Image: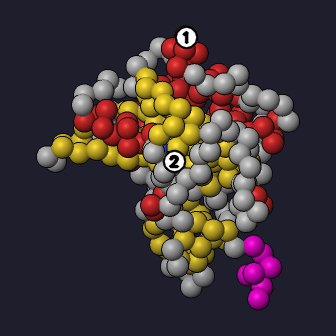
Amino acid sequence: MTLSQERLAHLLAQPFRYYDSVDSTNDIAQNWLREGAAPFSVVLADEQRKGRGRKGRYWYTPPGVALAVSVILKPTPQQASKISMLGALAVAELCDHAGIAGVGIKWPNDVQIHGKKVSGVLPEAVWLEGDLLGVVLGMGVNIRVQFAPEIAPIATNIEDEVAHRVDRAALIMYLLGRVTHWMAQDSDALFAAWRARLNTIGQHVQVDGIVGQAVDVELGGALLIKTDDGSMKRVLAGDLSLIPPQAEDE
Ligand code: BTN
């Protein structure tokens, strides 16, 4: 079934704005938040022309083949750093719900299926004169995207994994339900569930020039890396890559 204003109006309980095509759902949601949107209001689009990824990268959302969802949340400033974990966890649970095995989270918030990226999460805080107005939780999920040849080996789609057609509106409903669920839980429970799904702990990794073994994560989400010279480094954010065993031997 296609996404449409009518179908979403039938399914969603919270305020929402739906667009056939938009630059970025996160931009629309940020503006809506500044205008006073209620918590859990959501912006959805069938296509993004300028979808935003982490570190200013482009996020590919062609028409009809993905989920582009931005939820407006109003966490306390203390909870705000947990929104990234919450987004990744909600998407991972969506994949479980779709019947997919081998779902994990690559630190900090990439959802992977057997090591291939199916989703990206982009939380963006909105401040007004030093006060936190809220956080826009942007989630992109690949459903049936045709990837460029250089991306195909490292990316996947929900439909590639389940081998049948899925209903994007039903997936959106489930995803929003998990976001609402985790917003109501305490931070320790959220952290424990996110940590349990990380596929990064124990791996030999590289994050922004730091190389070593990922040994654990802290409550705030920082990754602890034991470098090859034995020192411990704490990384708050960054792009992580795994170092395959054969590269370690060279
Ligand atoms: C990443 O780089 O992994 C994060 C990608 C986040 C993409 C989502 S799609 C919905 C929302 N709108 C955007 O422009 N970006 C996020």
* Residue type at tag 1: His
**Rendered image quadrant of residue 207:** bottom right
- Estimate the x, y position of residue 33 in percent, counting from the top left: 30, 34
- Assign the magenta stretch its main secondary structure: helix
Left/right of residue 88 with respect to residue 94 in the rendered view: left
Can you tell me whether the CB of the residue at mark 2 lies under 8 Å from the nearest atom of ligand 1?
no
The residue to which callout 2 is attached is: 49
Residue displayed at 80% across by 79% down: 246
Residue 70 is tagged as none
Give, as a single range, the part of the protein colored magenta. Answer: 244-250
* Residue type at tag 2: Arg
- 118 or 184, nearer to the observer: 118
Task: Report whether residue 217 is seen.
Answer: no
- Estimate the x, y position of residue 88 in percent, counting from the top left: 56, 43
Residue displayed at 59% across by 51% down: 60
Task: Indicate the secondary structure of the residue bearing disc 2.
Answer: loop
Cα–Cα span, label 2 and label 1: 26 Å
The residue to which callout 1 is attached is: 10
Q: Residues within 10 Å of mark 2 (few under 14, many from 20)?
A: some
Can you tell me whether the CB of the residue at mark 1 lies under 8 Å from the nearest atom of ligand 1?
no
Left/right of residue 133 with respect to residue 18 in the rendered view: left
Q: Nearer the viewer, mark 2 or mark 1?
A: 2
Left/right of residue 205 with respect to residue 37 in the rendered view: right
